[in-house]
Image: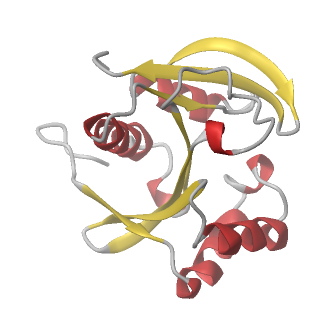
Amino acid sequence: MPPRDREPEYGFRPVTEADLPMIAGWLAEPHVAPWWDDPETEIAAIRDHIDSVEVEPLIVELDGRPIAYLQSYDPHMEDDHPYADQPFGTLGLDLSVGVPELVGIGHGPVIVRQFVDLLFAEGAPRVVVDPHPGNGRAIRAYEKAGFREIDRRSSQYGEVVLMAIDAGEDA
């Protein structure tokens, strides 16, 4: 559990080909699998994103140990993206804490907030997330990180709760 007196510092590094088997294992975990397509399909997409400009796939590390998969994306760089109606410069993110014993003890909101602060420092005006309405754990984690619901949508990604946080907002 993250210490109450200070938040842990997480590292964010690019995904490499060598990380893909580990990510596939995380995607197959019971706490992750319901929210992603099958691992083979997802790993193929993540492999494609390693060198893309639209999506930035990252490994989250805690004390040098890989613990989560995070991806950041620009909805304005993809034709017909369902979030292209958001202000220009908006970025989206997805997070899955892969290590089962680290789920549900406070890492998710802190990881998200630290990463969002980095995106704001780089000039993003807004960050959005899109958990499935049935993923209460993710919705609560994003709320703790300062996100608020702005819409509910149905798209090629399924049913989502579109949540946002704007630069300058406090968690």
State the residue in front, 89 or 94.
89
Rendered view: 106 above or below 134: below
| Image quadrant in which you'd find residue 77 | top right
Residue 1, position as x, y percentages in the image? 32, 49
| Image quadrant in which you'd find residue 64 | bottom left
Residue 27, position as x, y percentages in the image? 69, 64
Q: Point out the residue furthest to the top here.
A: 150
Drawn side of residue 41 relative to residue 102, left or right: right
The residue that appears at 61% across and 53% down in the rendered structure is: 54
Rendered view: 3 above or below 124: below
State the residue in front, 123 or 144.
123
The residue that appears at 69% across and 28% down in the rendered structure is: 83
Residue 36, position as x, y percentages in the image? 76, 53
- Counting every numbered tag in the picture gives 0
Drawn side of residue 34 relative to residue 126, left or right: right
State the residue in front, 99 or 167.
167
The residue that appears at 69% across and 71% down in the rendered structure is: 48
Quadrant of the drawing holding the C terminus = top left
How did the renderer colour the structure? secondary structure
The residue that appears at 20% across and 43% down in the rendered structure is: 7
Drawn side of residue 158 relative to residue 73, left or right: right
Rendered view: 111 above or below 12: above
Residue 40, position as x, y percentages in the image? 82, 73
Q: Point out the residue furthest to the bottom here.
A: 18
Q: Point out the residue furthest to the left here.
A: 5
| Image quadrant in which you'd find residue 71 | bottom right
Rendered view: 78 above or below 28: above
